Amino acid sequence: MNGKLDIDRDQIADFCRRHHIVRLALFGSALRDDFGPDSDVDVLVDFEPGQVPSFFRLSDMEDELSALFAGRKVDLRTPEDLSRYFRDRVIAQAEVQYARG
């Protein structure tokens, strides 16, 4: 992972367990050299079957992750949210931070 983003793995694991996330990965600028102080954090998640939250709950989760990432704006996405034109590339390049079983 890019050394510019300090992540507490225990806090991420706790977040994932509480929100029924089976996989959480970073993608986008957080993994590149152009990641800067004003960059947001793009997060890709897979939820347990039947546990995909509402739009409003996703927004709350973004706020919670933002606090874990030193106040940076977080864009939380599922693979289904991504455009079919670049979904496979994002998934291939994403760097997993948490995976259950």
Image (tube, rainbow, N blue to C red):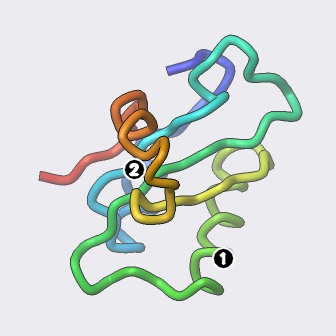
Left or right: 71 as drawn, with respect to 99:
right
| Residue at the image point whose x is 66% and y is 28% from the top | 29
Most extreme residue toward the top is: 33
Most extreme residue toward the left is: 101
Left or right: 94 as drawn, with respect to 54:
left
Q: Position of residue 80 (x, y in %)?
A: 41, 64
Question: Which of the two residues, 88 or 4, is positioned nearer the viewer here?
Answer: 88
Which residue type carries mark 2? Answer: Leu
Left or right: 2 as drawn, with respect to 19:
right
Determine the image quadrant of residue 91: top left
Which residue type carries mark 1? Answer: Asp
Q: Which residue is mark 2?
A: 24
Q: Position of residue 8 (x, y in %)?
A: 51, 39
Q: In whole angstroms, how far apart are the C-alphas of marks 2 and 1? A: 16 Å
Name the mark on residue 60.
1
Name the mark on residue 45.
none
Q: Position of residue 76 (x, y in %)?
A: 58, 59
Task: Check the image and report above or below for 99 versus 21.
Answer: above
